[in-house]
Amino acid sequence: MPSARDNGTAAGAGAVYGLGFIGAVVYFIQTAEGFWDGVVGFLQAIVWPAFLVHELMKFLEM
């Protein structure tokens, strides 16, 4: 049975993801040159943690 402490950690991780998502959406939409670039930017913002982990693993040569 999960403890209350586990729920707090999950909530904190969700908050970090949410703030990162908002920041990524703002960045990608600001740099978009057209409507479809904005749509692709929005989709990229959804999966930004995957890009981050991929680049980190490349950097660490894993």
Image (cartoon, rainbow, N blue to C red):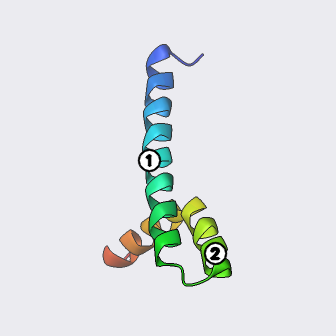
- Image quadrant for the C terminus? bottom left
Tell whether 50 sits left or right of 62. Answer: right
The answer to which quarter of the image holds residue 8 is top left
Identify which amino acid the numbered label 1 is placed on: Leu
Q: Position of residue 13 (x, y in %)?
A: 45, 39
- Give SS at disc 2: helix
Q: Residue furthest bottom?
A: 33
Image point 46% across, 38% down: which residue?
Answer: 15
Identify which amino acid the numbered label 2 is placed on: Val
Q: Residues within 10 Å of mark 2 (few under 14, many from 20)?
A: few
- Image quadrant for the N terminus? top right
The answer to which quarter of the image holds residue 44 is bottom right
Q: Position of residue 38 (x, y in %)?
A: 61, 74
Q: Residues within 10 Å of mark 1 (few under 14, many from 20)?
A: few
**Residue 40: mark:** 2
Q: Residue furthest left?
A: 60
Residue designated by label 1: 19
Q: Mark 2 or mark 1: which comes first in sequence?
A: 1
Q: Nearer the viewer, residue 38 or 19?
A: 38
Tell whether 7 sits left or right of 58. Answer: right
Tell whether 39 sits left or right of 23. Answer: right
Q: Compared with residue 32, is residue 27 higher up or lower down, i.e. above or below? A: above
Image point 43% across, 30% down: which residue?
Answer: 9
